[in-house]
């Protein structure tokens, strides 16, 4: 169970982006989070993936409250989350080849021995040809790079997947392919999914449950966050 | 905002606001062509001078085996001639040979000190940025404190603790010149650290050390390398200044600073060559190195073209 309990988070304590938001994702469940741009969805996704420390509130993973974020989170806690970001260009180190990008989490966690087996296997899963694996990010398209980023998120077999606008930069066929990969992985592993986006049609088809951003703010938070950003849909 | 755009739209070309261009952005075809050829000329001449200097310094002393200390009192203070192209000094030593030997020492000091300073600066800057919090604040305030003391003063203090020689000078230059590199590297690491690929690495289980070594430091290497090259001229000047003040190398050992210092007395007597040639040897190679560094900077950061950077 991944529980986000009345989280307040942001980049300036006096003006938080996320105010008093609660959300629960059960293991194996897929939850789509819909919201207009700029409402704080991505910040919430970063908090859920233990990448950003909230100002208030609690994240509870499998009954254990989280106390450390980023490097302060224990390694197996962090690697329980696979994260795919919106912009593949920014989320891939420009100096590494796609094969190195996919293999990096294995190397970082001392499982370099698995690289020769896992990387080609995942490359096949996400639809990356062997010739692309040797290229560096500037030599491939956004879609190809996002496939590598998804492979990187899956390489440690996470129990939770956080997809932050994963398909916003992609065309329809790549979107369909990547969503299919995620669903295939979830079916095989029973991982929970939090998919963040503003594309209602996509998220409603993809996820078992979709929630609107404005439904999440608790009773005490009123509608402060949502009212400031009138719905873009 | 919309109102002003409506009144001074593209139709009113005579309006001074729309005709105005920033000076740096004036892109008349001729001016651009001229500046490009100037740049090419600058890079070419700088490269030629640096090559010549490096060859002279590496090849001449071992190959020619001239004794730069050989004293010929009968030949003292001869003006430039075919036998002594740069003339001789007040004890009859050949100035061309001494200049080449002096350049060798100065360049050695400059390069070694620049490398050491860059390594210190990169380490401190990367440490401050990746540790963050109070470590960052304390380290950077210390950098501010050291920067507030004039380099030369601090350098003199350091050489004064040792016997005159090459290594005290190297230490003095290195310990006073790493501050700017630390600032550059810290700023660069801070900007790289907020990229999503660092988030992805953390989520992939990378330790602080791994993030720094694998993702952050390779990203700052071009900047740090540029800072190192730009520091070589500074280090040469610093060495010359220390030696000129009699605090750097022992006076008999030829370095560009000791040569200029030893020639001061003859300058007053009207003999110009013992100061002119070592002086040129200080200025021309350092300008050439700075010119090459500027060209490199333009390559890695084309938006910030500017004049010679010193």
Image: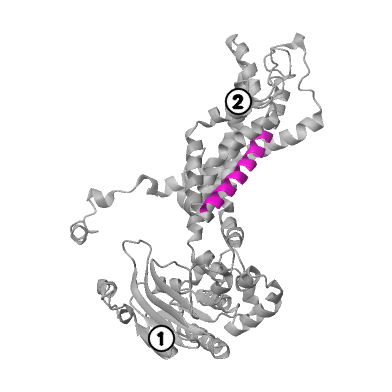
Q: Chain of mark 1?
A: A
Give me the C-alpha separation between circle 2 and circle 1.
70 Å
Given residues A134 and B168, the one toward you in this image is: B168
Q: Position of residue A92 (x, y in %)?
A: 54, 68
Given residues B138 and B128, the one toward you in this image is: B138
Tell if the residue under mark 2 belongs to the same chain as the one under mark 1. no
Task: State the scheme by which the image is colored.
Answer: one colour
Mark 1 residue crowding within 10 angstroms, few (<14) / some (14–19) / many (20+): many
Mark 2 residue crowding within 10 angstroms, few (<14) / some (14–19) / many (20+): many
Q: Is residue B124 above or below residue A103?
A: above
Q: Position of residue A187 (x, y in %)?
A: 54, 91
Q: Is residue B190 above or below residue A156?
A: above
Given residues A213 and B181, the one toward you in this image is: A213
Q: Is residue B266 above or below residue A141?
A: above
Residue B188: in magenta span: no
Q: Residue at x 57, y 87 (%)?
A: A189
- Mark 1, residue position: A203
Q: Position of residue B40 (x, y in %)?
A: 55, 45
The image quarter containing residue A97 is bottom right
Q: Is residue B167 left or right of residue A182?
A: right
Chief SS of the magenta region: helix
Q: Is residue A108 above or below residue B53?
A: below
Looking at the rendering, the stretch of residues picked out in magenta corresponds to: B108-129
Q: Residue at x 46, y 77 (%)?
A: A60
Q: Position of residue B154 (x, y in %)?
A: 55, 30
- Mark 2, residue position: B242
Q: Which mark is residue B208?
A: none
Q: Chain of mark 2?
A: B
Can you see residue B305?
yes
Are dots 2 and 1 in contact, CB under 8 Å? no
């Amino acid at each position: 169970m991944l529980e986000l309990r009345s989280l307040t988070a942001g980049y300036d304590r006096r003006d938080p982006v996320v105010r008093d938001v609660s959300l629960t994702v059960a293991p194996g469940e897929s939850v789509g989070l819909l919201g207009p741009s700029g409402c704080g969805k991505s910040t919430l996704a970063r908090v859920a993936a233990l990448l950003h420390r909230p100002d208030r509130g609690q994240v509870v993973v499998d009954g254990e409250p989280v106390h450390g974020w980023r490097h302060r989170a224990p390694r197996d806690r962090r690697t329980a989350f696979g994260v795919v970001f919106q912009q593949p260009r920014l989320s891939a180190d420009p100096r590494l080849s796609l094969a190195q990008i996919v293999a990096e989490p294995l190397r970082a966690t001392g499982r370099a021995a698995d690289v020769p087996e896992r990387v080609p296997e995942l490359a096949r899963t996400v639809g990356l040809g062997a010739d692309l694996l040797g290229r560096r990010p500037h030599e491939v398209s956004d879609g190809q790079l996002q496939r590598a980023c998804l492979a990187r998120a899956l390489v440690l077999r996470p129990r939770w997947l956080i997809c932050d606008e994963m398909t916003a930069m992609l065309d329809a066929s790549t979107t369909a392919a990547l969503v299919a990969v995620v669903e295939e992985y979830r079916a095989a592993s029973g991982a929970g999914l939090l998919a963040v986006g503003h594309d209602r049609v996509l998220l409603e088809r993809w996820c078992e449950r979709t929630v609107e951003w404005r439904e999440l703010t608790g009773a005490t938070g009123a509608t402060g966050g949502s009212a400031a950003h009138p719905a873009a849909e | 905002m919309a109102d002003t755009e409506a009144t001074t739209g593209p139709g009113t070309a005579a309006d001074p606001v729309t005709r105005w261009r920033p000076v740096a952005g004036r892109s008349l075809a001729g001016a651009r062509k001229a500046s490009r050829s100037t740049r090419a000329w600058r890079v070419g001449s700088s490269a030629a001078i640096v090559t010549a200097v490096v060859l002279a310094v590496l090849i001449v002393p071992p190959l020619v085996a001239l004794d730069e200390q050989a004293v010929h009192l009968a030949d003292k203070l001869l003006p430039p001639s075919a036998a002594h192209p740069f003339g001789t000094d007040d004890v009859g030593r050949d100035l061309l040979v001494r200049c080449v030997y002096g350049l060798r020492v100065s360049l050695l000091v400059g390069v070694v000190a620049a490398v050491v300073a860059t390594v210190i600066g990169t380490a401190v800057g990367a440490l401050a940025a990746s540790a963050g919090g109070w470590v960052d604040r304390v380290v950077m305030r210390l950098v501010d404190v050291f920067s507030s003391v004039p380099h030369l003063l601090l350098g003199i203090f350091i050489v004064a603790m040792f016997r005159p020689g090459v290594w005290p000078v190297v230490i003095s230059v290195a310990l006073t010149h790493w501050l700017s590199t630390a600032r550059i590297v810290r700023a660069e690491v801070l900007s790289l650290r907020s990229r999503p690929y660092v988030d992805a690495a953390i989520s992939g289980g990378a330790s602080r050390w791994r993030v720094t070594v694998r993702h952050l430091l390779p990203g700052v290497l071009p900047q740090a390398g540029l800072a190192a090259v730009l520091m070589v001229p500074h280090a040469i000047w610093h060495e010359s200044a220390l030696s000129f003040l009699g605090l750097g190398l022992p006076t008999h050992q030829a370095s560009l600073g000791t040569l200029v210092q030893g020639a001061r007395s003859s300058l007053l007597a009207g003999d110009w060559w013992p100061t002119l040639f070592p002086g040129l040897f200080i200025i021309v190679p350092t300008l050439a190195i700075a010119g090459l560094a500027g060209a490199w900077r333009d390559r890695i950061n084309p938006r910030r073209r500017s004049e010679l950077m010193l």
